[in-house]
Amino acid sequence: MKIPVKIRGMEFSVPNLTLTNDDMAKIVETSDEWIRQRTGIAERHVVSGEEDAVTLGISAVNKLLEKENIDAKTIDMIISATSAPQRPYPSVACEIQSAIGADNASAFDLVAACSGFLYAMQMARANIASGFAKRILVLAADATSKFLDWTDRSSCVLFGDGAAATILEVSEDGEDDIIAMHLDADGKNKEFISLNIPNQNCPLAEPHQNPENLHIIMAGKDVYKFVMQKIPAVIEKTLEKANMTIDDIDYFIPHQANLRMIEALTTRIKIAPEKVLHNIEHYGNMSATSIPCVISEKIKSGELKTPSTVLLSAFGAGMTSAGAIIRLR
Ligand SMILES: CC(C)(COP(=O)(O)OP(=O)(O)OC[C@H]1O[C@@H](n2cnc3c(N)ncnc32)[C@H](O)[C@@H]1OP(=O)(O)O)[C@@H](O)C(=O)NCCC(=O)NCCS
């Protein structure tokens, strides 16, 4: 028997430092007009000082636990969708486990870049459905700004930092909030977006050299074409799994990478523009945090009314992609 899952709360956190497009024009040859027209982005938040993926994650998780009145010791597992951590290990999830005192939880990071939150939701859903865990903290946390090439105007203007968190737990009333999930990966296109980390062979094998290209490298046009070709099919498969059509969807929240892509997808999948929610204007692309941040912010502002059936779609480095249909109560 499959155990149904409840989605409990959604909170997010962003750094205080905001960079406008005019700020970006101080470091690369660009303009507010170009960035707005080509991407829809007006500003983004970036970490400074001691902030990183861990501190952003702790802040989002603390807001969630307080709002939902959840004792951290009742959490069985922590999955952090993190692709730009300060260090590969200890994992962000383990850092958060100790910070919040979730002493009874296992903890690990999951790397699926901007699709990470949906991938992590599916891993949590499967662990709950199988009876292995009852309450799982799912979060997204990335400080992508630390890995950008701040001389590359075609990538550095696109991203922002942030974290978001939710709890998935056994649904006591039997209602399943995750109606359908579809995950996809296309490693053939792995070079479209990449991030190298420092690594060297033993000096007896090779003399050491200064590392280079240790920042995010992206083929923007290839990503754009990939998304336009791939995401409509991912959405179709997700709808099929839910036995639904696009008319059954109350809101569509796509990954927030580029407003032009969001508009093109809206037309392609034939959903009414008023059902499409975005906040890329104020945050840029926050990787796995983008989708839960839109959910949280739009519920708070009243633009996303509950109860509702919501279609989510994501894509990211890998290339990974994912679709989900969830019920927000
Ligand atoms: C990156 C992206 C915004 C570029 O937009 P575009 O309309 O495709 O622009 P192009 O790459 O054709 O570049 C057009 C010109 O603008 C220039 N340009 C690029 N970035 C610029 C910037 N920030 N400001 C001003 N000019 C810029 C280019 O150098 C190019 O100049 P050229 O014609 O003299 O060579 C767009 O391709 C995109 O959003 N792709 C998807 C990226 C993505 O989603 N990444 C995240 C995945 S999770």
Image (tube, rainbow, N blue to C red):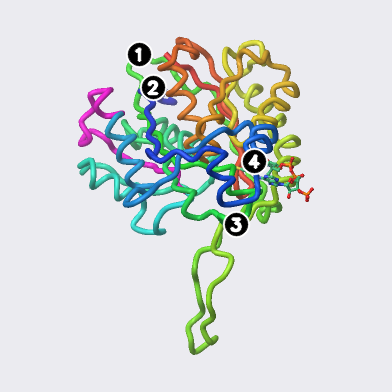
Secondary structure type for disc 4:
loop
The residue lying toward the viewer, choosing from 209 and 281, is 281
Circle 4 sits on which residue? 31
Q: Residue at x 40, y 56 (%)?
A: 86
What distance separates the C-alpha of mark 2 from that of mark 4? 44 Å
Callout 1 crowding tier (Cα within 10 Å): few <14, some 14–19, many ≥20: few
What distance separates the C-alpha of mark 4 from that of mark 3? 14 Å
Drawn side of residue 7 relative to residue 319, left or right: left
- Magenta segment boundaries in residue numbering: 64-82
Query: Which of the image's four quarters has the C terminus?
Result: top left
Rendering coords of residue 131 (x, y %): 36, 33
Q: Residue at x 39, y 15 (%)?
A: 174
Q: Is mark 4 within 8 Å of ligand 1?
A: yes
Callout 4 crowding tier (Cα within 10 Å): few <14, some 14–19, many ≥20: some
Circle 2 sits on which residue? 6
Disc 2 or disc 4, which is closer to the eye? 4
Query: Which of the image's four quarters has the N terminus?
Result: top left
| Rendered position, 99 above or below 234 | below
Q: Residue at x 31, y 37 (%)?
A: 59
Tell me, yes or no, whether the two marked residues, 2 and 1, touch with CB atoms within 8 Å. yes
Earlier residue among tags 2 and 4? 2
Circle 1 sits on which residue? 173
Disc 1 or disc 3, which is closer to the eye? 3
- Asked if residue 80 is among those painted magenta in the image, a careful observer would answer yes
Drawn side of residue 294 relative to residue 274, left or right: left
Type of the residue with mark 2: Lys
Circle 3 sits on which residue? 151
- Asked if residue 76 is among those painted magenta in the image, a careful observer would answer yes
Earlier residue among tags 1 and 4? 4
